[in-house]
Amino acid sequence: MVEEYDIAIFGGGISGFSAALRLQNKGLKTIVFESHGQLGGCAGFFTKKGFSFDVGATTLVDFIEGGVGGNFFKDIKLDIPKGKYIDYIAWLPDRQITLYQDAEKWKKERLDKIGSTQNHIEFWKLMDEVTKVFWAASRKNIKLPIRTPKDIYILVKCIGIKNLHLVKYLNSTILDIVKKYNLKNDKPLVGLLSMLIEDTVHSTIDKAPFINSALGVTIRGAGLMRAEGGMKSFWNHLSNHYLKIGGTIKKGNKVLNFKQENNSWNIKTSKGSFKAKKVINSLPIDLLQTICPDSIKNKLQPFIAKNEKNKGSAIVVFLGVPENEVSNQTLDHHQILLDYESKLGKGNNMFISVSEKDDHISAPQGFRSVMISTHCEIAEWQNLSEMEYQIKKQNIGLYLIEMARKVYPNLGQNPIIYEIGTPLTYQKFTNRIHGSVGGFKQTKENANLKAVPQDIGVKNFWLTGDNTWPGLGTVAGLISGRIASEYAEK
């Protein structure tokens, strides 16, 4: 006899698993299907020779009391994981800028290092106003895109009537605002904004929506932290609690297809058949389309077609190195822009995350785990012969290490671990088609009011994950997971 669950969740990444935790905590019987051998998805980890590496997300956003992350842990009655709230350094071609958690330090730093003209002051004033209002709205459970009159009410309530005039910026890009203050030719400002926007909304300064960009640029001031022990400890913390409160996890269990019969979903996986009254999907929508019934496929197609050109991926170098290769820096996180004039990606905008000195979950004593990541286009990794692929992979790995030596001159001289992740690596281990990661590149045409909603109009079925509003990142994943869980618990 096939056991039936109240709610089945497809995908054990941050969005799907956070929805499962919320629902299980409320007494519903839930099951999570994860095709990989462990949880996490693009916010997961892998281990090798005593080292643990974060495979995508290396930091957690808004994990403070009253923040999106803090509220999530409060709702599921679990302590926020131990970790370190971080500052980090943005290395521009001609200067270094410390991105401080502390608001007053950051205000001083940006004026000292970027510019203190009246135009700069007015630009940052608007940025501060927008981020204050919309970070608060995110923490008050705002929901987009608008689907019902109730959603309009929630929007107004979360933003506040006195702040509704800021909604006009939904139709602006960050470049529009830079131009408004005659700062388009300010290379340090545009360079800094560009690198932070690519990292947080996976887009470019001329296409990224202003409000989303403003939130992305200010994540350091919103409880940015690295969990003690990295994502390995984070997932152990979450999964142990989920199991403790009665949840079911099926790892290495790939959903092959599902269909609705007699008010239940019949779910066929690589390891058996299951039933659930309701389903929450956190798989990318193009992957979902390959396993879903026509009733869902027809709803997804317009979103898939619209976003086909808005996919991207990443390259990550994983190093396990002796302590002395990274001991020259006080801070453990750095972001590098090599050239103001060149296109971002493929090393021109790279993020370096190093485990803490005494973090012996991430690395053995006397060693550190290092992750170097950069964005890339998917097409350039397609249709390669095995030899072409291996040469390309090794070349980009060597290049990223060489460029990272701007921060750590001795990096990679005597690595214990040296692994390179490419789009094909993500395709293999996360099942994402062609290794597409990070959600869609956000534009005015596909974000916010035009984003993929959690409710697409199929009974007892909802979406979550980085393909849906509000997009990529741990904080966005928690928001979309919350919205999906609220639908499902009714």
Image: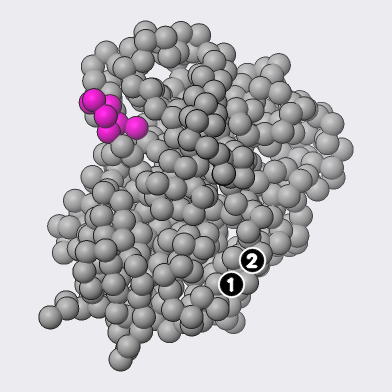
Q: Which of the pair 100/185 is nearer the observer?
A: 185
Q: Is residue 121 left or right of residue 442?
A: right
Q: Look at the image and tell me in which quarter the N terminus lies.
A: bottom left
Identified by mark 1, the residue type is Gln
* Residue at 48% from the left image edge and 35% from the top image edge: 386
- Residue 163's x, y, as percent? 67, 61
Q: Which residue is mark 1?
A: 301
Identified by mark 2, the residue type is Ala
Is residue 49 in the magenta section?
A: yes
- Residue 31's x, y, as percent? 25, 66
Looking at the magenta stretch, what is its main secondary structure?
strand
Q: Which of the pair 280/172 is nearer the observer?
A: 280
- Residue 179's x, y, as percent? 84, 42
Marks 2/1 in contact by CB < 8 Å: the verdict is yes
Crowd around label 2: few <14 · some 14–19 · many ≥20 (10 Å): few
Q: CA distance from mark 2 to mark 1?
A: 6 Å
The colour scheme used here is one colour
Residue 188, relative to residue 131: is it above or below? above
Magenta highlight range: 47-53
Callout 2: SS: helix
- Residue 151's x, y, as percent? 56, 75
Callout 1: SS: helix
Residue 161, image quadrant? bottom right
* Residue at 48% from the left image edge and 80% from the top image edge: 294
* Residue at 49% from the left image edge and 47% from the top image edge: 435
**Can the viewer see residue 2?**
yes
Q: Which mark is residue 305?
A: 2
Q: Residue furthest right?
A: 182
**Can the viewer see residue 217?**
no
